[in-house]
Image (spheres, coloured by chain):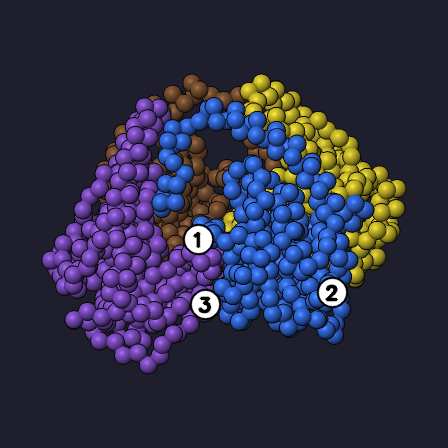
Chain colours: A brown, B purple, C yellow, D blue
Amino acid sequence: MQEIKVIRLKDELQLREPVFLVGLPGVGHVGKLVAEHLIEELDAEKIIEIYSHHFPPQVLVDENSEIHMVNNEMYICSTDECDILILVGDHQSSTAEGHYQLCDLYLDIAEEFGIKKIYTLGGFPTGQLTHSDEVLGAVNNPELKEELVNAGVVFRENEPGGGIVGASGLILGLSRFRKMDAACLMGLTSGYLVDPKSAQSLLKVISRLFSIEIDEGPLEERAKEMEKIVARLKEVEQQQQQMAMPEANIKDEDLRYIG
Amino acid sequence: MQEIKVIRLKDELQLREPVFLVGLPGVGHVGKLVAEHLIEELDAEKIIEIYSHHFPPQVLVDENSEIHMVNNEMYICSTDECDILILVGDHQSSTAEGHYQLCDLYLDIAEEFGIKKIYTLGGFPTGQLTHSDEVLGAVNNPELKEELVNAGVVFRENEPGGGIVGASGLILGLSRFRKMDAACLMGLTSGYLVDPKSAQSLLKVISRLFSIEIDEGPLEERAKEMEKIVARLKEVEQQQQQMAMPEANIKDEDLRYIG
Amino acid sequence: MQEIKVIRLKDELQLREPVFLVGLPGVGHVGKLVAEHLIEELDAEKIIEIYSHHFPPQVLVDENSEIHMVNNEMYICSTDECDILILVGDHQSSTAEGHYQLCDLYLDIAEEFGIKKIYTLGGFPTGQLTHSDEVLGAVNNPELKEELVNAGVVFRENEPGGGIVGASGLILGLSRFRKMDAACLMGLTSGYLVDPKSAQSLLKVISRLFSIEIDEGPLEERAKEMEKIVARLKEVEQQQQQMAMPEANIKDEDLRYIG
Amino acid sequence: MQEIKVIRLKDELQLREPVFLVGLPGVGHVGKLVAEHLIEELDAEKIIEIYSHHFPPQVLVDENSEIHMVNNEMYICSTDECDILILVGDHQSSTAEGHYQLCDLYLDIAEEFGIKKIYTLGGFPTGQLTHSDEVLGAVNNPELKEELVNAGVVFRENEPGGGIVGASGLILGLSRFRKMDAACLMGLTSGYLVDPKSAQSLLKVISRLFSIEIDEGPLEERAKEMEKIVARLKEVEQQQQQMAMPEANIKDEDLRYIG
């Protein structure tokens, strides 16, 4: 198999004012949850499958015990205003080189479809189990900020402090070389768990950006399941705090200095 | 040495209705044990050696202190109904890229021999030391299921939940691109130990699929040895349970949510 | 994206007696702190950006929530005597291969500018939290030593004992193939923390080497911040020493023998 | 820099009945110690330097604070009977691929010099701190065994059980493809420490094989130093045995079954 294999299920596609949404697995799977939810609710159609030896050498098994190889997939759907190209996947690249190769491929395809604007969806790890409704933003072009603020996105100086790792960040960087506008939208999440609740917050922002109505039902249910687990984890956390280590004397804000 | 080196010990081979069996090392070495047992019991003949820098840079030492380089090997043997091409090896690829390259090579050779059907053999880790006779299946084509169920294979929704990692899974995925039918047959096993007992269960299924009689003697003996070790490990397990951590408060079924 | 992408912001550059200063992240970020400080104090101008898939697949976020891709950058500035080419960056290569590829690229550019002398700046980990004002040196040509000793650099037999890892060392090795003189200047530092104080010591040496005056103000402030943290860490250290392990019976000087 | 860079310090070399000795770093640095000792005692001359991005991106610092890049080197020396080509180095490849590439390069050079026989030198980890004078052998051609047994080498069924990892093993495997005879000679050693005492045992075997006299003085001294450290480690070992874990219930001979 060549390094990357692209299978097109449809050709001769003409997209209308297309916007590119990227929702790959990552912190709290927030971006993936939102993208998959949109695909379902907007009856998106699969148009491209991407396979690569930069993905883990693995297959997944479905409810009929049929396998499919780990891949990334692109879907299209329409709103009144525009078409949306959505990228989802089982995994991100498991190599640094692969991240660069694949993100460049995604952008090649995006360019081919005449994409002008990109939103990458992800999670921002707070380390706190208590939920916040906030959606944090970062952009590769300051002109994007106003529209995003109006949709409820928050911008904070130098946040995320550790930068944005993986496709959600790299696509912003690489699209800049192609003069494409791109923003990363991150739902705040603990960083420990899959977080449908943070996905709901992010979904609200998306709905405003595309002025569409999305039924949150399925996410709602998963969110309820999680709350039970979070409750249990909080107990554990407390137990652990009681056996705190001397290191705890170092305040969090110091850690950023540690080389 | 080129990335992959294939040494053919025999050419001009004509195979009769050939089926491809893959038994590489993996969980509990179940697939490897079965494949090696078949090679011995069916007097299979070695026809191909495969060397690659995707295998660990290592040699193994035999009973005469002679070395052989880590490799994968292909054997052929015959039943009344068909010929069987068997892949065994010391190791699987130690790189993700290598998994893709090597599995594609295996399938090139399989195509060359006119293989129509593939069974990859492996183990399915239960985390439990108590033995189960079950053999779990996954397929790349639903039409394969009936025959397998008749041979005693069990199919369970979305199992294995973590997918199938390595050659046993990847070969199912990649063979689909070549319109070859492939199934993965997994003996249930603890995941902690080499498991000849699980290999016996899998061997029974194979015997039915090929309607052949196989003497289980040698596997039987190794299985007995293992039972003693398992008994000891169970003691250890109990001792450890007595010093359980607070994390234990989180139920297993929660873990699948952990991002 | 090709393996390495070089963006030149200025062409047709003529440099006067140019010297190459390398200040990439490393032990205590000493080299990086000094290089960034020089860029600011000497109003250096950015001339080159280097992107590579050998850098982590990541973007960083600035005070305006704008991103920039992890990269390395080259700046030029002038003193009365010469021009200085300065290399700084967010990260070093995250692969061994990348270290070799990138260091060779840096030297290609250095050669193109007619560089005759190179100083790589780094930190030398002492494992001790108590500050030392010392700057340790290593060279790829003994003739460099006299000038450096006069500027306050110390040379110690076989130090650093573990060699010099990463670009600061590799550039010395690779530049030798090109008959370029290069020295590595290392500020002593604990190895646990970003160390602006060690950067000040190294900056003093640089000032003498280029006979320039540099305002240490900004470094001074950060140094003060750190002292507080160091104080706290020392407490922790003491607490930990009270729960010392039996291994502690092995004297430090023995460890170098451990295979 | 290309993947591998070979610098020849001498050309037009004619070797007499040359034998190839490989002494790279490894278990207990036994092979490296012997090879370096031979180079010194036999006044061997350096003829080749090998640099590669498969070595760690690092330089080492000598007693004059001069650096040299991590590399492998080849030396030649003469005995009454034959010439000896000796390979030594600071490191082995840090990638699996590199092991294959470099070992093939070593063999290309060996073939060019008309090498017929190869001895790779290494250590065999016993996990025991008590010294054994034994030297274990493995071969890629059974005809080599008689001569080696006469020189005091011991052969044991399937030992080393884990195979031989790295260049010492791989060279045996790859040289077989070139019809070159090769043996690996392993001094028994704890596996925890640099072991000059084991190197002495191995040196005795080499002396017999080449019927040469070698002064063991320098090794003798280092061996004495080590004995003190070993004594201390034994104390530690005892202390630790007193806090043994339940796992200790599993007998060593069981571990080979663990998957």
- Pick whichever, A153 or B259, lies toward us: B259
* Dot in front, 3 or 1: 1
Q: Position of residue D131 (x, y in %)?
A: 58, 39
Q: Amino acid at mark 1?
A: Asn
Query: Residue at position x 65%, y 51% from top?
Result: D204
Farthest residue, direction front? D150
Report the residue at 64% width, 63% height from top: D20
The chain that hosts pointer 2 is D
Q: Which residue is mark 1?
A: D158
Q: Is residue B92 left or right of residue D124?
A: left
Answer yes or no: are tags 1 and 2 on the same subunit: yes
- Which residue occupies 22% across, 53% down? B217
> Do marks 3 and 2 share a subunit?
no
As rendered, which of A150 and D10 lies closer to the eye? D10
The answer to whether the residue labelled 1 contacts the one labelled 2, judged by CB atoms less than 8 Å apart, is: no
**Mark 2 = which residue?**
D80
Residue A191 seen in render: yes
Q: Amino acid at mark 2?
A: Asp
Badge 2: residue crowd in 10 Å (few <14, some 14–19, many ≥20): few
User: Residue C152, percent across and down?
Assistant: 84, 39
